[in-house]
Image: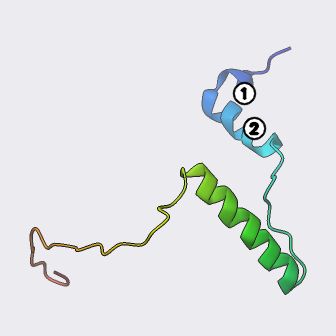
Amino acid sequence: MHNEQSFDTLAFSHQLYEDSPRELEFNASCIAEAEKWQSILRSKLIELIGGLPSAKCDLQPQVLEIHEFEKYT
């Protein structure tokens, strides 16, 4: 049976999120556990963004425009 919230896509999405297990939830109780979690999370994030370049390179930034504002440039 459906309730009114099941037809509200935002409420439904929020409920799905609340019901989802947190695979990489942080719950370390010591530094060693925190460092292990950090390592696992870092690996997962790199996987999700499609990896990082294998070699570092100079970025060679260039200023294209400068705008002066009252409190910052």
Name the quarter where the C terminus is drawn: bottom left
Residue occupying image coordinates x 54% and y 50%? 50
Q: Give coordinates of residue 55: x percent, y percent.
A: 45, 69
Mark 1 crowd level (few <14, some 14–19, many ≥20, 10 Å Cα): few
Answer whether labels 2 and 1 touch (C-beta < 8 Å). Answer: yes
Quarter occupied by residue 28: bottom right
Quarter occupied by residue 45: bottom right
Is 73 on the left or on the right of 2, as rendered?
left
Q: Tell me the amino acid under the disc marked 2.
A: Gln
Residue furthest out toward the right: 29
Give the CA separation, mark 2 to mark 1: 9 Å
Q: Which residue is mark 1?
A: 5
Is 11 on the left or on the right of 27, as rendered?
left
Residue furthest out toward the front: 55
Q: Tell me the amino acid under the disc marked 1.
A: Gln
Residue occupying image coordinates x 10% and y 68%? 64
Q: Give coordinates of residue 66: x percent, y percent.
A: 9, 74
* Label 2 residue SS: helix
Is 23 on the left or on the right of 4, as rendered?
right
Q: Give coordinates of residue 51: x percent, y percent.
A: 55, 55
Q: Give coordinates of residue 43: x percent, y percent.
A: 68, 62
Q: Is residue 45 above or below residue 56?
A: above
Q: Which residue is mark 2?
A: 15
* Label 1 residue SS: helix
